[in-house]
Image (spheres, rainbow, N blue to C red):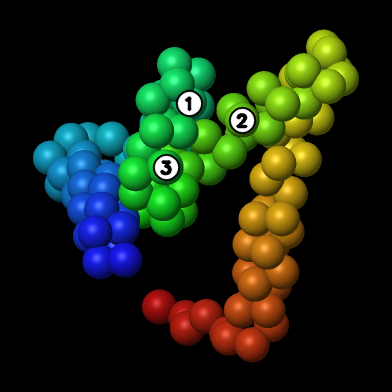
């Protein structure tokens, strides 16, 4: 149990540390860094590396944005095998629909409960 938690902490922490270094030492905007993380997850999934990382680190690899890219790529891969060309358009959204819906619902709840302060 402890080695699994340690790997999750190390891999998740490394992904976050790389993002922080990019924010601190480059002129990349946060939006570009977030997009790069998703694209990196898709690329690493396409070459077969990211699923191995998820097996090693579990939530440390599947929770960050690179994990979202991996989820999109895996969803497209499975959907293309089942539905053919149409799976390119349906797979990513089908695989990630639960996470997207949860983000929208919690965002709506937070917007309804909390009011922004004027500066």
Earlier along the polypeptide chain: callout 1 or callout 2? Answer: 1
Residue placed under numbered mark 2 in the picture? 74
- Mark 1 element type: helix
Q: Residue at x 82, y 12 (%)?
A: 85
The residue furthest front is: 1
Please state the total of marks drawn on the protein image.
Answer: 3
Q: Are marks 1 and 2 in contact (CB under 8 Å)?
A: yes
Q: Nearer the viewer, residue 48 or 65?
A: 48
Earlier along the polypeptide chain: callout 3 or callout 2? Answer: 3
Look at the image and tell me in which quarter the N terminus lies: bottom left
Q: Residue at x 65, y 72 (%)?
A: 106
Left or right: residue 21 versus residue 98 is left
Look at the image and tell me in which quarter the C terminus lies: bottom left
Q: Quadrant of residue 65?
A: top left
Q: Residue at x 77, y 40 (%)?
A: 94
Image coordinates of residue 12 in percent, x first then y, are: 30, 52
Left or right: residue 23 versus residue 29 is left
Residue placed under numbered mark 3 in the picture? 54
- Report how far apart the C-alphas of labels 1 and 2 lie in the structure: 7 Å
Left or right: residue 107 versus residue 6 is right
Please indicate, yes or no, whether residue 31 appears anywhere in the rendered image: no
Residue placed under numbered mark 1 in the picture? 45
Image coordinates of residue 38 in percent, x first then y, are: 47, 35
Q: Nearer the viewer, residue 58 or 22?
A: 58
When the figure is inspected, residue 63 is found, relative to residue 27, above or below; the finding is below
Q: Nearer the viewer, residue 59 or 103?
A: 59
When the figure is inspected, residue 106 is found, relative to residue 77, above or below; the finding is below
């Amino acid at each position: 149990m402890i080695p699994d938690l340690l790997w999750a902490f190390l891999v998740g922490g490394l992904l976050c540390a790389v993002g922080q270094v990019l924010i601190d030492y480059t002129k990349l905007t946060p939006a570009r860094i977030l997009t790069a993380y998703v694209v990196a997850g898709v690329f690493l999934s396409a070459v077969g590396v990211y699923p191995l990382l998820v097996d090693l680190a579990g939530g440390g690899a599947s929770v960050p944005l690179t994990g979202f890219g991996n989820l999109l790529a895996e969803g497209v891969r499975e959907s293309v095998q089942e539905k053919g060309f149409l799976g390119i358009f349906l797979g990513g959204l089908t695989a990630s629909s639960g996470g997207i819906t949860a983000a929208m619902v919690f965002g709506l709840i937070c917007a309804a409960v909390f009011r922004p302060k004027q500066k």
